Image (tube, rainbow, N blue to C red):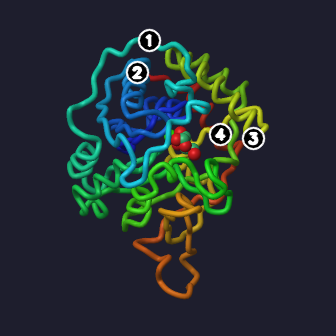
């Protein structure tokens, strides 16, 4: 049976590729997309989600969510990484569909309550929608099957500050609520995603296989690739958000440690994620909130890339 998922996203070049996987993979039942600010404004995020689903020839519910962080002042969207339009500033066709009237948080609550114990929420942007859903229904912690978060960094260092990863940094207060809650949670952070580099030749194969959607994935990838060349000196891109889906369907490609997660919400280390290993005791219990999470500490990079390419060259949206 395919796994029912809600995909919470701020598309975003790497989000777009992950959405293509979620739409195409036969082992995923995509219940809907929920959108958040992050790589782009909330309006652009919702626009891009609608467009990508249309280009795939599918009709999937899309619910708009958080326009900004819970507490801190919103950072400007990173136009130099994803483009001002989130998809590498390429020209895009007009969008014809509309988002639901329902909020993202309400959509998550309703879908999880309709199928208790079955739904996995995969979140690959700032975590305001999940934090709001938890506030609407604290019982979600026992009803969601699992929460998979692309975000954070334990030993790898940060990508927007020396210690913080972008999704956590963009809304650390929401991230603290989500990562410290007592639900089954897997963190797929930079410790794993930086081991995976999608090279241009592999991307070309995906473009060829994915039709109109592939064209947008390929052209936006070119912009994202420039950023990686300049920032990290590598020829290729880390498919961060796809890695969360790879973990869901191929957990054997990751090394996992169990630990309690915390998020630093203020000060110089704002947005840093900390993991207290389950097996260790510290001077007091401040670092041991909720339930231990599964934290991806490494990945089989070539295995992950092979899986992504295989998925997007074998399965195409109807
Ligand atoms: O740090 C990587 C994450 O930040 C990804 O989700 C990417 O889309 C950006 O939002
Ligand atoms: Ca993202």
Q: Position of residue 286 (x, y in %)?
A: 47, 79
Mark 2 or 1, nearer chain start: 2
Q: Is mark 4 within 8 Å of ligand 1?
A: yes
Query: Residue furthest toward the bottom?
Result: 283
Which residue in the structure is indicated by mark 1? 93
* Labelled disc at residue 238: 4
* Labelled disc at residue 232: 3
Task: Report the residue at 77% width, 37% height from top.
Answer: 234
Q: Are marks 4 and 2 in contact (CB under 8 Å)?
A: no
Q: Is residue 63 above or below residue 189?
A: above
Whether residue 253 is visible, yes or no, is no
Between disc 3 and disc 4, the foreground one is 3
Asked if residue 215 lies left or right of residue 115, the reply is right
How many callouts does the rendering have? Answer: 4
Q: Position of residue 181 (x, y in %)?
A: 37, 65
Q: Are marks 1 and 4 in contact (CB under 8 Å)?
A: no
> What separation in Å lies between label 3 and label 4 (alpha carbons)?
11 Å
> What separation in Å lies between label 1 and label 3 (alpha carbons)?
32 Å
Tell me the crowding category of disc 1: few under 14, some 14 to 19, or many 20 or more residues within 10 angstroms, Cα based.
few
* Labelled disc at residue 201: none
Which element is circle 2 on? helix
Q: Is residue 157 above or below residue 123?
A: below
Which element is circle 1 on? loop
Q: Are marks 1 and 3 in contact (CB under 8 Å)?
A: no
Whether residue 172 is visible, yes or no, is yes
Mark 3 or 2, nearer chain start: 2
Q: Is residue 109 above or below residue 293?
A: above
Q: Position of residue 291 (x, y in %)?
A: 42, 71
* Labelled disc at residue 51: 2
> What separation in Å lies between label 3 and label 2 (alpha carbons)?
30 Å
Mark 1 or 3, nearer chain start: 1
């Amino acid at each position: 049976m395919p796994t029912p998922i809600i995909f919470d996203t701020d598309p975003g070049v790497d989000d777009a590729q992950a959405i293509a996987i979620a739409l195409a993979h036969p082992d995923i039942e995509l219940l809907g997309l929920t959108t958040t600010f992050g790589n782009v404004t909330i309006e652009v995020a919702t626009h891009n989600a609608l467009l990508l689903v249309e280009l795939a020839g599918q009709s999937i519910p899309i619910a708009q969510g958080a326009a900004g962080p819970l507490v801190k002042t919103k950072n400007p969207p990173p136009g130099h990484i994803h483009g001002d339009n989130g998809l590498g500033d390429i020209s895009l066709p007009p969008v014809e569909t509309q988002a639901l009237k329902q909020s993202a948080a309400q959509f998550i609550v309703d879908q999880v309550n309709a199928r208790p114990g079955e739904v996995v929420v995969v979140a690959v942007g700032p975590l305001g929608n999940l934090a709001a859903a938890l506030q609407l229904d604290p019982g979600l912690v026992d009803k969601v099957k699992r929460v998979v978060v692309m975000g954070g960094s334990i030993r790898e260092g940060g990508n927007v500050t020396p210690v913080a990863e972008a999704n956590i940094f963009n809304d650390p207060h929401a991230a603290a609520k989500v990562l410290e809650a007592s639900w089954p949670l897997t963190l797929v952070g930079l410790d794993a995603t930086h081991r995976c580099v999608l090279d241009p030749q592999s991307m070309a194969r995906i473009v060829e296989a994915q039709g109109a959607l592939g064209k947008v994935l390929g052209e936006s990838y070119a912009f994202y690739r420039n950023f990686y060349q300049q920032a990290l000196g590598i020829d290729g891109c880390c498919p961060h958000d796809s890695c969360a889906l790879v973990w869901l369907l191929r957990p054997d490609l990751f090394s996992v440690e169990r630990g309690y997660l915390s998020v630093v919400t203020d000060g110089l280390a704002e947005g840093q994620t900390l993991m207290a290993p389950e097996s260790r005791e510290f001077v007091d219990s401040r670092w041991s909130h909720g339930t231990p999470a599964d934290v991806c500490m490494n990945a089989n990079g070539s295995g992950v890339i092979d899986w992504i390419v295989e998925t997007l060259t074998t399965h195409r949206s109807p």
